[in-house]
Amino acid sequence: MEEQLYEIIKKVYDKNNRNLFTFLTGAGISADSGIPTYRGIDGIWIKGTQFHKPEEFGTYKYFKEHPEEVWQYSLFRKKMFESAEPNESHREIVEIENLLEDKFHLITQNIDNLHRRAGTKRIYEIHGNNREIKCSNGCKEIVNLPDEIKGKDIDEDLTANDIELLKCKECGSWMRPYILWFDERYDEKTNKRFSALKIAKNSGILFIAGTSGATNLPIVIAETTLKYGGTIVDINTEDNLFTKLIKDKKNKIIIRGTSTETLKTIKEIFKNIC
């Protein structure tokens, strides 16, 4: 595997017209930091006697009907994110960026801010982030979540001050988390859709780590890289939707193992050729 990786990385690095190396990451990257997946069993939200699956409450429709409940859950996850620390995979990606500089891009599905906290700069957060909020009624620009609003315990309700701070100063509507919900479409302003696809088009190699491809844009990113002659490196512990996409393609490498060890190998290869 290491020899195959070296050969393809060296080949792409030496090309002048296709020299972008892109990393696409998902929840699996943050698992070693103690952050559970959003879509899996750990993402189920319990409120009173009600059990809600993410696909139910992680929607704009549900937010409009139950804004306080959705904010309570969001602030519970905020506390979880803030108590977590970037792990070795995050740090390996930073070191790879430092080696590649402008030849590097990171596209992440994660909203937990751990890539940024680790030091990654060339980053596209295609599912939004947990740092910012916007008006649910569509007015005003994106703003930072006020510092006065703290993370919550799972059974902790919003305070009156929280509610006041979470109302739009322009129209009085609820502000909402700056994330992509299940009933929303990708766009450029919120999700960097076109920027991400442009990067995918110009990527000699797309390294996919810690994501199964359960959402639309990541799959389209991989399809775009393949369409324009790039190679896909699927780094996951088990087969997934990306594996299905690339199984009959020549320009692919499938690696079954932890992201940390594989990223360490990739970093050492770049050290040798940069």
Image (cartoon, rainbow, N blue to C red):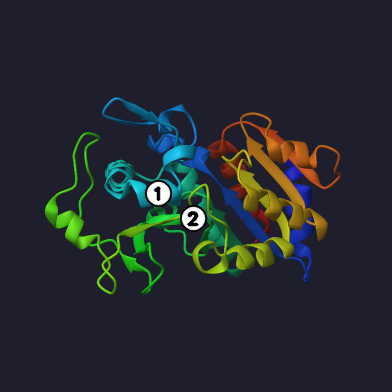
Label ID, residue 164: none
Q: Which residue carries the number 1 mark? A: 112
Location of residue 53 with respect to 169 vertically, above or below = above
Q: Residue at x 57, y 33 (%)?
A: 258
Q: Residue at x 47, y 49 (%)?
A: 110
Considering the numbered disc 2 on the image, is that residue within a helix, a strand or a loop? helix
Q: Residue at x 22, y 42 (%)?
A: 152
Judge from the rendering whether residue 137 lies leftward or rightward of residue 68; answer left or right.
right
Please state, as top left, top right, bottom left or bottom right, where the C terminus lies in the image. bottom right
Q: Earlier in the sequence, mark 2 or mark 1?
A: 2
Quarter of the rendering containing residue 168: bottom left
For the image shown, how many numbered marks are present on the structure? Answer: 2
Q: Which residue carries the number 2 mark? A: 94
Judge from the rendering whether residue 174 lies leftward or rightward of residue 209; answer left or right.
left
Residue found at the far top of this picture: 49
Residue found at the far front of this picture: 65
Residue 244: x %, y % from top left: 76, 36
